[in-house]
Amino acid sequence: MTHIPRIGIGGPVGSGKSMLIERIVPMLAKKGYSLSIISNDVISKEDADRMRNNLATEKGLLPENLVIGIATGGCPHTAVREDPSMNLSVIEEMETKHSDLDLIIIESGGDNITTTFSPILADYFIYIIDVAGGDKYPRKGGLGIESCDLLVINKIDLANQIGADLEIMKRDAIKIRKGRPFEFINCKTDEGVTKVVEHIVHDVLFDTQPKSLVIK
Ligand SMILES: Nc1nc2c(ncn2[C@@H]2O[C@H](COP(=O)(O)OP(=O)(O)OP(=O)(O)O)[C@@H](O)[C@H]2O)c(=O)[nH]1
Ligand SMILES: [Mg+2]
């Protein structure tokens, strides 16, 4: 069976996981990549419903059959780390039915700073925090912040209101990430979001052409 590359996106409740997906999917689609989204929510399937019917575009982010909602119940990170079987069975179905997909994006349920993805589930792990938590993050660390492939610091437009110093966050991110990548973004204006797309195209898709453009 074809292995479709998978990105896991995790982070605290409300940090902007869904909104980041809503921003990067059209950018990747514009480059010709075809994608699917799996959105894990603890109780509802609200995020998946929202992505199927994105009010911003009025067209829906992706066709209904390419956006899967999973209501995980219980501890949000169990479904993406300890026991990813629910997600893996959805992926298996995707790989059978849609082998021409270039990428699958998996959103975890909103959680605390210990979220990580099982390497069995995700090939690449993006952890997203937002400045509203205060500039003590990323200094406080946590598995997600420290171990992810790409740390994203969202809502930089709120830094002034919240009194968060982006220079402090930058200094601490460099230190705690030991030089590994991080990006500041604003999902409301797309500032910095193209950088996230560049990481994905380079580090996950290895700068390969979209499958639809490869002459068979
Ligand atoms: N000001 C500002 N608000 C943002 C930004 N990104 C997201 N938001 C808002 O933050 C709220 C939460 O965003 P979501 O994308 O739903 O966050 P989430 O991490 O998916 O939330 P859960 O899945 O419920 O954990 C929404 O009201 C967004 O409009 C940003 O860059 N700036
Ligand atoms: Mg969400």
Image (spheres, grey):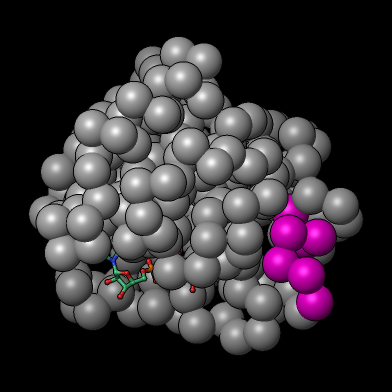
77 sits to left or right of 126: right
Name the residue located 41 percent from the left edge and 21 percent from the top edge.
174
Name the residue located 79 percent from the left edge and 49 percent from the top edge.
81
**Relative image position of residue 7 (x, y in whole percent):** 56, 40
Name the residue located 50 percent from the left edge and 73 percent from the top edge.
48
| Number of numbered markers | 0
**Relative image position of residue 107 (x, y in whole percent):** 55, 57
**Relative image position of residue 111 (x, y in whole percent):** 62, 63
Q: Nearer the viewer, residue 49 or 148?
A: 148
Name the residue located 23 percent from the left edge and 62 percent from the top edge.
162
Q: Nearer the viewer, residue 216 or 8?
A: 8
Q: Nearer the viewer, residue 211 or 78?
A: 78
The magenta segment is 74-80
**Relative image position of residue 86 (x, y in whole percent):** 80, 63
Residue 78, compared with residue 154, is above or below; it is: below
Asked if residue 38 is among those painted magenta in the image, a careful observer would answer no
213 sits to left or right of 139: left
Residue 161, compared with residue 28, is above or below; it is: below
Would residue 206 be seen by someone viewing this image from the given angle? no
Report which quarter residue 208 is drawn in.
top left
Q: Nearer the viewer, residue 11 or 117?
A: 11
187 sits to left or right of 42: left
Would residue 172 be seen by someone viewing this image from the given angle? yes
Residue 192, compared with residue 175, is above or below; it is: below
* Viewport quadrant of the N terminus: top right
